[in-house]
Image (spheres, rainbow, N blue to C red):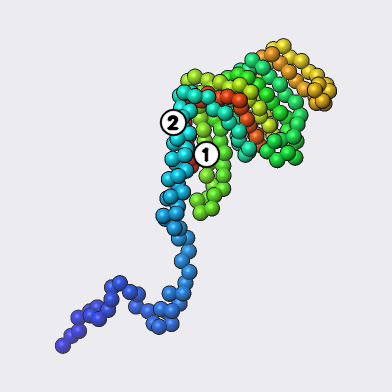
Amino acid sequence: MQQEPFIGESLNKPNLSNVDQQLFEQQPVIGRVNRSIFWSVMLVALLVLGGITTLISKGAIAMAAAVPVPVTVTASSIKTTRFRLYPGISQADNTSPVAVNQLDGTLANLVITKTVPLPVIGNVTVTLKAGQNTPVSTTGLTTDLAGLSSDSATFGGQAVNSNANGNAFEIDAQSATLNNITINAPYMIANSMTLPGLSLSVK
């Protein structure tokens, strides 16, 4: 009588010898993530981001912001009614030399990006955009400048002072316009800021 194939064999377990079976069971599981913890953290983060976005969307309210992390800021134009620039120490770490800029004014097509390395997930880039149609308005915006570039800059009522208020060098202007600007900033703070057309994305 011919024996039928696969009789007595399990389709759910690998056909391994005792030694192979022990090695198979002892191998560590690589790349596994506790899904309940991961999705709980992601849900809380999304709820917080969603709440912030809802509160300040369409410039409904002003936002007081302090960002003590390095960020990249771009804008198609910055128009100020008060401009001040002087050397200083970054408030992010109280050690790094920076150029401190203070202004009141508007920013068109504002984009703020920050890349953060996170465990398990890897690098996460957060991008905030506002002012595409209606410019962002701000008062008391103070930025520690680690780097700045602009296609063009125009100043009105400009004054260059030495030893002003204890600073070795200071530039003041009654008005200033900067076009296609890119800023690297370890620290930003604003007394108030409206963000019309706000959108936030995470990649």
Question: What is the quadrant of the N terminus in the image?
Answer: bottom left
Residue position for label 1: 126
Q: Residue 165: x, y in percent?
A: 80, 23
**Is residue 83 something one can see in this rendering?**
yes
Q: Residue furthest left?
A: 1
Q: Residue 107: x, y in percent?
A: 57, 22
Q: Amino acid at mark 1?
A: Val
The residue positioned 48% from the left and 69% from the top of the image is 28
Q: Quadrant of residue 70?
A: top right
In the image, 94 versus 184, the foreground residue is 94
In the image, 97 versus 47, the foreground residue is 47
Residue position for label 2: 54
Badge 1, how many Cα within 10 Å: few under 14, some, many 20+?
A: some
The residue positioned 68% from the left and 31% from the top of the image is 145
124 relative to 6, above or below: above
**Front label number (2 vs 1):** 2
Mark positioned earlier in the residue sequence (2 or 1):
2
How far separated are the C-alphas under marks 2 and 1? 17 Å
